[in-house]
Image (cartoon, rainbow, N blue to C red):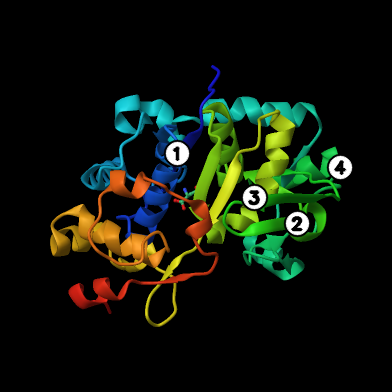
């Protein structure tokens, strides 16, 4: 399949109801491609199927539709192909390619061993793998496999990867020093986010990836996978996160300002879009505004790098604890 025009995507993990920060991400990714007549897709990142029931994915669709954030392909209308939990066989073919090139090895390290032996990753607090299982002999692998299942790791070269993020600017990481060999398949057989996201964005013809700034530390690893698979690398935009008045970032787990609360409090999308537009620098005031209005003259250079305070207008209406 060839895709010529720009293609954006929203790729939520349906582990809870979306919050305002998720809508900001959906809104900016939608505006970015729609303002240029591009294609927009919805992919459900439910790799961890137990934590991500279909009902929550359906709720995300309902919330997106309520805002008018429409998509050309994906979601439930597109069938299983748009749910990562149903795409294992696709990921398997890409895993096999890496295996044929001798780039994978089984890792038997337990969580406790990993934490004890490694240095923290520079930007996201995950750990840089020390390479403990890289040199295991066939005999050692057989022995260890009797006791526990192995995760699968990808060998990374000592090489610096860099890119110009559309929001955060220049970014670089050395794969060996800052990331280390990383997991592409967990010991329970579930494929890792890093592999699935690259295979999907690559296969689905995504040309721009808009997501939270907290994921920028994954991008160097993903760029390495893009190269190994021969996919064109998309333009990345790592957008600022919304923070509560006490400085903490919004999280789905805490049910902060989820869409259930907001839809009830405001009754229609325009006031919420207006507040988000002001918070992220697209408009001077928080007056209610529609998506088509926001798409007019949409400009990434207005979006700041740093975290964004929750709009004060929201705090006046919603009882935020
Ligand atoms: N599924 C991830 C999330 O909901 C987003 C991953 C991505 O956009 O690359 O946080």
- For mark 1, give the secondary structure: helix
Q: Are circles 1 and 4 on residues that touch, CB within 8 Å?
A: no
Q: Mark 4 — residue? A: 137
Which is more N-terminal, label 4 or label 1? 1
Q: Mark 3 — residue? A: 219
Mark-to-mark CA distance, 1 and 2: 28 Å
Decide if residue 214 is on the left or right side of residue 102.
Answer: left
Task: Tell me the residue at 84%/49% (across/down).
Answer: 159
Q: Which of pointers 4 and 2 indicates the residue nearer the eye?
A: 2
Decide if residue 246 is on the left or right side of residue 4.
Answer: left
- For mark 2, give the secondary structure: strand
Which is more N-terminal, label 2 or label 4? 4
Query: Which of the two residues, 296 or 76, is positioned nearer the viewer here?
Result: 296
Task: Tell me the residue at 38%/48% (across/down).
Answer: 26
Image height of 182 relative to 97, above or below? below
Mark-to-mark CA distance, 4 and 2: 30 Å
Q: Which of pointers 1 and 4 indicates the residue nearer the eye?
A: 1
């Amino acid at each position: 399949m060839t895709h010529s025009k720009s293609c954006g995507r929203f790729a939520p993990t349906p582990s809870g109801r979306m919050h305002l920060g998720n809508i900001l991400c959906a809104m900016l990714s939608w505006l970015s491609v729609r303002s240029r007549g591009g294609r927009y897709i919805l992919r459900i990142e439910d790799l961890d199927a137990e934590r991500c029931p279909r009902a929550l994915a359906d709720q995300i669709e309902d919330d997106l539709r309520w805002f008018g954030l429409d998509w050309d392909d994906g979601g439930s209308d597109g069938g299983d192909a748009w749910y990562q939990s149903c795409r294992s066989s696709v990921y398997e073919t890409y895993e096999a390619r890496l295996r044929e090139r001798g780039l994978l090895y089984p890792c038997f390290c337990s969580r406790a061993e990993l934490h004890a032996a490694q240095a923290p990753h520079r930007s996201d607090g995950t750990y840089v793998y020390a390479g403990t299982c890289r040199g295991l002999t066939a005999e050692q692998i057989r022995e260890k496999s009797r006791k526990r299942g192995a995760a699968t790791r990808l060998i990374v070269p000592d090489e610096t990867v860099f890119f110009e993020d559309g929001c955060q600017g220049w970014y670089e990481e050395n794969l060996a020093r800052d990331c280390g060999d990383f997991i592409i398949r967990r010991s329970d057989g579930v494929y890792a986010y890093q592999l699935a996201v690259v295979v999907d964005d690559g296969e689905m013809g995504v040309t721009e990836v808009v997501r939270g700034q907290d994921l920028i530390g994954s991008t160097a690893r993903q760029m390495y996978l893009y190269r190994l698979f021969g996919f064109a690398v998309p333009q990345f935009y790592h957008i600022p996160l919304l923070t509560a008045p006490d400085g903490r970032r919004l999280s789905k787990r805490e049910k902060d300002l989820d869409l259930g609360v907001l839809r009830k409090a405001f009754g229609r999308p325009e006031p919420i879009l207006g507040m988000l537009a002001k918070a992220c620098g697209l408009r001077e005031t928080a007056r209610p505004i529609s998506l088509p209005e926001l798409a007019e003259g949409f400009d990434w250079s207005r979006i700041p790098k740093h975290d964004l305070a929750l709009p004060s207008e929201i705090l006046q209406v919603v009882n935020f604890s």
